[in-house]
Amino acid sequence: MLKIGLPKGSLQDATFDLMHRAGFSLQVGSRSYFPSIDDEQINVILFRAQEMSRYVEDGVIDLGLTGRDWVEENGSDVVEVAELVYSKQTLHPARWVLAVPETSAVQSVKDLEGKLIATELVNVTKRFLAKHGVSARVEYSYGATEAKVGIVDAIVELTETGSSLRSNRLRVVETLMYTTPRLIANRQSWQDAWKRMKIENIAMLLQGAILARTKVGLKMNVPESSRDKVLALLPSLRNPTVSPLSERGWFAVETVLDESTARAIIPDLKRAGAQGIIEFPLNKVIP
């Protein structure tokens, strides 16, 4: 049995969606921490992302999904199996930033000497300050950190788009780190041949699901007279698949490409002679 920890909280819905795209069906009640999964070899538990790396390191679970930030914060000794670039809002990395009120005189981290900073990421913040030779007080924030500006001199907060900071009239001074979700494994579990293969299989499916989110498939019928013109327009992971149809002189063409590229070239494909163009979504793309 492989014990997997998935994040409870803000990243939970995005994680369940990713697992679904990877081919796993998860069901959980609103008050439950033990989702059911359609794989009898896997047992799933929900933990806070902040705690996940400690449970993986200690062997409570074999595999966990949490942010790089919390692995760094906890100083956990784990195997990083894969980086999974997805989040609750975007497909881009989030970042921890040092922020102050728009009217603050603070222009750099050096200006925080002797000041008070609130954050959930206490250890990373202390190391950042030490690296810059700054002595400041860092207190743990139990949430609503942005609301504490005015009580403290600065905050270190996680942001994806910066919209929440702007709405609270905060200005970014420095970026401490970028973070993305990581699939991490217990070191002893990684040495177990069966568990390692299971973990590697899960990682492959999850990475394929993430890659597929920005891609689509295209199918079309192309007459022989237009084949070269159509193929010249088509990007592909390798080369487009071209198969002769039962009707002589016609070919079926199929490819995978970025969704943004598809919308740009479909009109050109039609003008080049392609017919019956079908665009379809993808669950997984395994390079």
Image (tube, grey):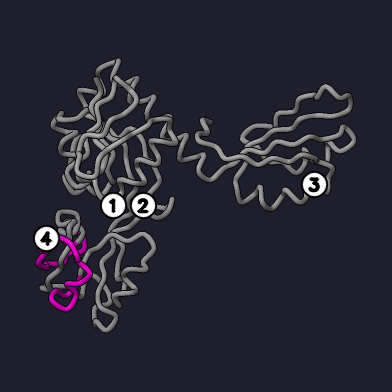
Q: Nearer the viewer, mark 3 or mark 4?
A: 3
Q: Which residues are magenta?
A: 129-154
Of callouts 3 and 2, the N-terminal one: 2
- The tag on residue 10 is 1
Query: Residue 113, percent across and down?
Result: 14, 73
Q: Which residue is mark 4?
A: 140
Residue at mark 4 to residue at mark 1: CA–CA distance: 19 Å
Query: Residue 58, percent across and down?
Result: 13, 32
Of callouts 3 and 1, the N-terminal one: 1
Q: Quadrant of residue 227?
A: top right
- Amino acid marked by disc 4: Tyr
Q: Residue at x 16, y 36 (%)?
A: 55
Callout 3: SS: helix
Residue at mark 3 to residue at mark 4: CA–CA distance: 59 Å
| Along the viewing direction, whichever of 112 and 14 lies nearer the viewer | 14
| Along the viewing direction, whichever of 267 and 186 lies nearer the viewer | 267
Of callouts 4 and 1, the N-terminal one: 1
Of callouts 2 and 4, the N-terminal one: 2
- Amino acid marked by disc 2: Lys
